[in-house]
Amino acid sequence: MKPYLILFLLSSVLGLGFTSCNESKEIQAGESITSHPIEVTIKEKGKGKFALELYLPRDFGFQIEAPHRIFLSGSDGLKVTSADLKLNGPTHPKKIEYFEYVKPLTFQVEGKGKLQMEGKLFYCNFVKNICIPAKISKSFSI
């Protein structure tokens, strides 16, 4: 009975090692990387109207079906009155699970002050075949 128990334990340990391997590596949500290639800019489109633009380098893409979260808040006299912060854009021609690029996200503010952007965006590196959640915290003066 003892040899069967040892054989079972050995096969379980080795089996778990092989079954957990996967062709694409995905980092779990709790393991987000603080350094990321996402560039964030804002552009004024009119009085109190702005566009938040998100950029990724070539061979990267934002996941379409990921739970992206972006929050905007104002301080020092700035108030965010409305915001459309849902990622949208054309699908990538080679990888349909990703956006080729993300269209600018629009928002409106009242007053002047600081705009704080907090977010969690899911992107993938096509060359390394790895998907990573990025935590973003950025401040802008408006």
Image (spheres, rainbow, N blue to C red):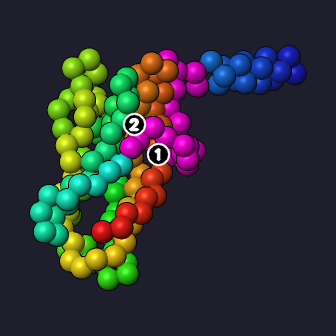
Asked whether 38 falls inside the magenta stretch, the response is: yes
Q: Is residue 127 left or right of residue 12?
A: left
Q: Which residues are magenta?
A: 20-39
Instruction: Give percent across and percent down for residue 49.
Output: 16, 64
Tell me the crowding category of disc 2: few under 14, some 14 to 19, or many 20 or more residues within 10 angstroms, Cα based: many
Circle nearer the N terminus (1, 2): 2
The x and y percentages for residue 68 are: 34, 49
Residue 127's quadrant in the figure? top left
Q: Is residue 122 above or below residue 14?
A: below
State the residue position of label 1. 134
SS class, disc 1? strand
Q: Quadrant of the C terminus?
A: bottom left
Q: Residue shown at 36%/67% (left/top)?
A: 141
Q: Residue 80 location in percent, x, y?
A: 25, 73
Q: Label for residue 86?
A: none
Task: Kindly identify the amino acid type of the residue bearing the numbered disc 1.
Answer: Ala
Residue at image mark 2: 123
